[in-house]
Image (cartoon, rainbow, N blue to C red):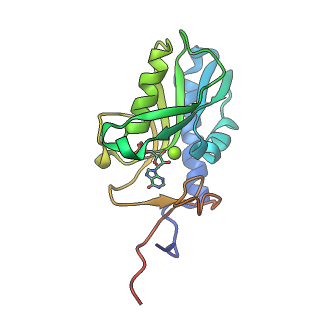
Amino acid sequence: MRLPDEPKFSGSQIQSRINELATTLNHDLEKMNPLFLITLKGAIHFGSDLLRKITISHELDFIQAKSYEDTQSTGTIGILKEPTTPLDGRVPVLLEDIVDTGLTAHSLEDWCRQQGAKDFLCCTLLNKPANRKIEFEPNYVGYEVGKNEFVVGYGMDYNEEYRSLPEIYVLETSSPD
Ligand code: IMP
Ligand code: MG
């Protein structure tokens, strides 16, 4: 796999889309007081840039999920790190880097509701709607990407590589020498 010369989304494109998303959240979710954001590891760049544009009262917590390879077909995920804030009666807004098969976000929604959350929202920078294995519709989406586009950069990795790139690239399959 190799990086192409041109990014799919430049740093400035990402930032301007994040500004738009923040404006929408500030408007739509103003009444939540405080807005309750929970973020996953991969969304650290996205969450950090988005949060700097959130002007309404908000709380932030972290969640860590792990999908089990051997049971992937059932979409089972485990919660490795629970948010410290009790979810009972709250409306968590999950920040995701990318919703792909939908299994992670769907399972996290189930888990949050089991903990007593009265609703659940998802804000994702990228969305691959053509790749779903389970029905899941994020409420707020930065950009859509194609089913066969494997993206890296801006927090997203390929085997832990490329996470720190400021832009987003679609990895290309290396041509044989
Ligand atoms: P899911 O398939 O919707 O459960 O997505 C689970 C996770 O897979 C995402 O949070 C990403 O961390 C990772 N992922 C899915 N597609 C991509 C991609 O194109 N690039 C990098 N990571 C991805
Ligand atoms: Mg992720």
Q: Is residue 49 above or below residue 34?
A: below
Question: As drawn, which residue projects farthest toward the bottom?
Answer: 177
Judged from this view, the residue extending furthest toward the front is 70
In the depicted structure, whether residue 170 falls above or below residue 90: below
Residue with the most extreme top position: 89
Residue 101 at least partly seen? no
Residue 83: image location, x then y, percent: 62, 25
Among the 4 quarters of the image, the one containing residue 88: top right
The x, y position of residue 13, in whole percent, is: 56, 55
Nearer-the-camera pick, 176 or 147: 176
Relative to residue 55, is residue 170 drawn left or right? left
Name the residue: 45% across, 16% down: 114
Give the number of marks. Answer: 0
From the viewer's perspective, tell me whether residue 152 is left or right of residue 56. left
Residue ID at (66%, 22%): 84
* Residue drawn 55% across the image and 14% down it: 90
Is residue 169 at all visible to an observer of this figure? yes
- Residue 10 in the image, given as x and y percentages of width and height: 56, 61
Q: Nearer the viewer, residue 17 or 176?
A: 176
At horizontal 48% and vertical 33% (from top left) the residue drawn is: 78
* Quadrant of the rendering where the C terminus is positioned: bottom left
Frontmost residue, 25 versus 127 = 127
| Residue 18 at x, y percent in the picture | 57, 44
Q: Nearer the viewer, residue 146 or 70?
A: 70
